[in-house]
Image (tube, rainbow, N blue to C red):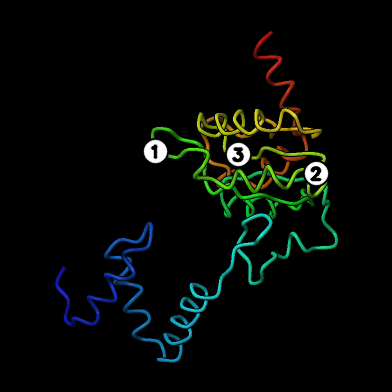
């Protein structure tokens, strides 16, 4: 792709580093911004820089936050005895959009995947285990994507929690196996949260 300006080429290269953005899309974005007032580009750049420099991760659940503790953990209307374990921040956003869940969250930052070289020590598991007795958690919802890696992570966590007096539930299988949680439609995801099942029952059925 030939560019009439090295500055435009550099801007296109920067945009094309974003996931799902090819060179043609990046060029279209750059040319659009070139036609806008310079103040628009400055606001855009300032917003990105501020986000990258000032964003924090919640000290309790590892969700993104403007403060040390995120708005969900500090919210007065949340059920403090229930924690929904998710793989990523995007999963929190997906579940919150259903308006069906009012408990807390814990972001693992991934799932156990030996093939990808991801082990339990690479995830936010230690802080999760420490939260259970410290915060008086009564129920843990394992809201991980229904994949082999997700199921492996749920099994590992359940083994770590076997001595804890806590109920472990999983999402109802309204979400197809092998699918990603963040791509489930809001109605299906909401129903899966509301009709969650005891994880121990799932184990017993598989062994029976």
Which is nearer the N-term, disc 3 or disc 2? 2
Whether pointer 2 and pointer 1 mark residues with C-beta atoms closer than 8 Å, the reply is no
Decide: is 3 above or below 20: below
Q: What residue appears at the point 70 percent right and 14 percent down from the top-left corner?
A: 205
- Nearer to me, 61 or 28: 61
Label 3: few (<14), some or many (≥20) within 10 Å?
A: many
Q: Nearer the viewer, mark 3 or mark 2?
A: 2
Q: What residue appears at the point 62 percent right and 58 percent down from the top-left corner?
A: 63
Quadrant showing the C terminus: top right
Decide: is 141 above or below 104: above
Q: Which residue is the site of mark 2? A: 137
Q: CA distance from mark 2 to mark 1?
A: 31 Å
Which is nearer the N-term, disc 2 or disc 1? 1
Decide: is 29 above or below 180: below
Q: Which residue is the site of mark 3? A: 144
| Element at label 2 | loop
Residue 116: mark in rendering: 1
Which is nearer the N-term, disc 1 or disc 3? 1
Residue 111 in the image: x percent, y percent?
52, 40
Q: What residue appears at the point 80 percent right and 49 percent down from the top-left corner?
A: 135
Q: What residue appears at the point 48 percent right and 85 percent down from the top-left corner?
A: 43
Q: CA distance from mark 1 to mark 3?
A: 17 Å
């Amino acid at each position: 792709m030939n560019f009439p300006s090295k500055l435009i080429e550099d801007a296109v290269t920067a945009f094309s580093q974003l996931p799902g953005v090819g060179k043609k899309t990046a060029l279209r974005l750059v040319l659009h911004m070139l036609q806008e007032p310079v103040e628009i580009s400055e606001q855009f750049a300032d917003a990105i820089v501020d986000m990258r420099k000032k964003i924090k991760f919640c000290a309790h659940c590892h969700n993104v936050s403007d403060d040390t503790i995120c708005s969900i953990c500090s919210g007065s209307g949340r059920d403090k005895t229930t924690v929904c374990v998710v793989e990523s921040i995007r999963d929190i956003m997906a579940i919150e959009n259903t308006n069906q869940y009012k408990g807390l969250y814990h972001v693992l930052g991934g799932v156990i995947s030996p093939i990808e070289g991801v082990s339990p020590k690479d995830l936010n598991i230690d802080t999760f285990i420490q939260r259970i007795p410290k915060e008086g958690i009564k129920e843990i919802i394992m809201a991980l994507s229904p994949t082999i890696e997700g199921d492996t992570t749920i099994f590992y966590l359940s083994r770590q929690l076997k001595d804890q007096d806590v109920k472990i539930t999983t999402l109802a299988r309204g979400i197809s196996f092998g699918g990603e949680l963040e791509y489930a439609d809001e109605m299906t995801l909401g129903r899966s949260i509301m009709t969650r099942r005891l994880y121990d029952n799932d184990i017993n059925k598989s062994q029976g």
